[in-house]
Image (cartoon, grey):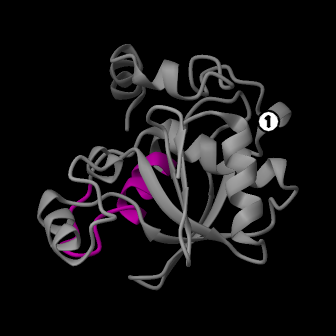
Amino acid sequence: MTRREAVKFLLKGFVLASVPVIPRLAFSYPVSRHCSGRLSLFNVHTNEALALSYLNRQGNIDSGAVDALNHFFRCHYNDNVYPIAPDLFVLLDVVRTRLGKTAHRYRLFSGYRSPEYNRILRRRSSAVAKDSYHLKGMAADVLLEGVRLDLVQRTAVNLKKGGVGKYSQFVHLDVGPVRTW
């Protein structure tokens, strides 16, 4: 995502409302206060690993890193890549930082979902939302390696920055309206 695309994204309004702990997303954001500016991930479906800094030293989004993250978070069913809300990356980072586990990596079970794949999942389970935030590039189902799911859930809930749901294998985090399940 280029800086211009990120600004357009911000102007749509939901980024500013989704993670207000991060003023105007990460542009000129004091990185050390709430997050590390780095993510380490493993995709359980593609067996890919990724560790990178998504913010530069000034706290600005690194467009090359966001491109890599968008590809990493792609729909594993059909390899469709979709722009992921940068504030989701910040949320994942903030949760990990609050837990004091910045050296731990996330296992990604689901990032972006194509409409086709979401329909398949809905046929298998009533727990899959028709208008899932995964379809909008605003959600991730994750497990933080070496950390109990209930700790990740509780930390995310306390942030009050989006939706948080706990399942048997992962925690769902999104940057939509604040809600829990």
Q: Position of residue 47 (x, y in %)?
A: 46, 85
Q: Position of residue 20 (x, y in %)?
A: 62, 21
As drawn, the residue found furthest toward the right would be 100
Which residue is tagged 1?
34
Quadrant (top left/top right/bottom left/bottom right) for the N terminus: top left
Q: Residue at x 29, y 74 (%)?
A: 76
- For the residue pair 5 and 125, the one nearer the viewer reads as 125
Q: Is residue 89 above or below residue 71?
A: above
Q: Is residue 4 magenta?
A: no
Q: Is residue 8 left or right of residue 36?
A: left
What's the residue at 27%, 73% (across, down)? 125
Side (left or right) of 13 relative to 114 = right
Using the image, determine if residue 117 lies above or below residue 30: below
Residue 154 located left or right of residue 16: right
Task: Say what amino acid the circle numbered 1 marks.
Answer: His
> Image height check: is 26 above or below 69?
above
Q: Which residues are magenta?
A: 65-81
Circle 1 packing at 10 Å, graded few (<14), some (14-19), many (20+), is: some
